[in-house]
Amino acid sequence: MNKIYYLASCDTCRKIIKSLPEGHNLAFHDIKQNPISVEELEEMHKLSGSYEALFSRKAQLYKSMDLKNKSLTEDDYKKYILEHYTFLSRPVFIIDDKIYIGNSQKNVQEVLKVLG
């Protein structure tokens, strides 16, 4: 099943969702209302190759917890993503067993192309 993991309160996520083509058949998963499970994170990890690729350094908690001055391991990235939704780089699309992480213009264009 094709999915999008997003944050409903995120303006960037909402803008990207509005730009999706009609009939895209994505299952929507709001990570604040319904935190991601270990199994879902494992699926993302398998597709992306690392927890670090899924981790958001833009999160306010990243700065307030002073994580930028710590040497984080893959286990740390996994733990933080599971502890708080804000650490997941978003949106995350899983389409036809391929993962698209984050809101870069290149990434969004690829998603639109695949869904279009």
Image (cartoon, rainbow, N blue to C red):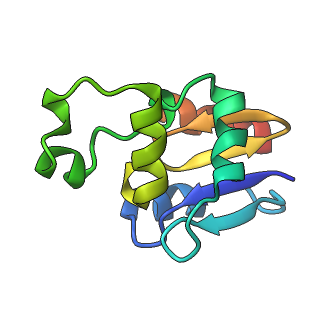
Left or right placement of residue 113 versus residue 103 in this view: right
The residue lying at 40 percent from left, 72 percent from top is 9
* Residue 116 in view in this figure: no
Residue 86, percent from left and from top = 37, 56
Q: Quadrant of residue 19?
A: bottom right
Above or below 58: residue 71: above
Left or right placement of residue 52 versus residue 4 in this view: left
Q: How many labels does the image show?
A: 0
The residue lying at 65 percent from left, 66 percent from top is 29
The residue lying at 63 percent from left, 22 percent from top is 49
Residue 76, percent from left and from top = 39, 36
Residue 13, percent from left and from top = 48, 58
| Depth order, front residue of 92/66 | 66
Q: Residue furthest bottom?
A: 33
| Depth order, front residue of 18/51 | 51
* Residue 77 in view in this figure: yes
Residue 64, percent from left and from top = 12, 51
The residue lying at 37 percent from left, 41 percent from top is 56
Left or right placement of residue 33 versus residue 89 in this view: right
Quarter of the image with the C terminus is top right
| Depth order, front residue of 26/36 | 36
Above or below 37: residue 101: above
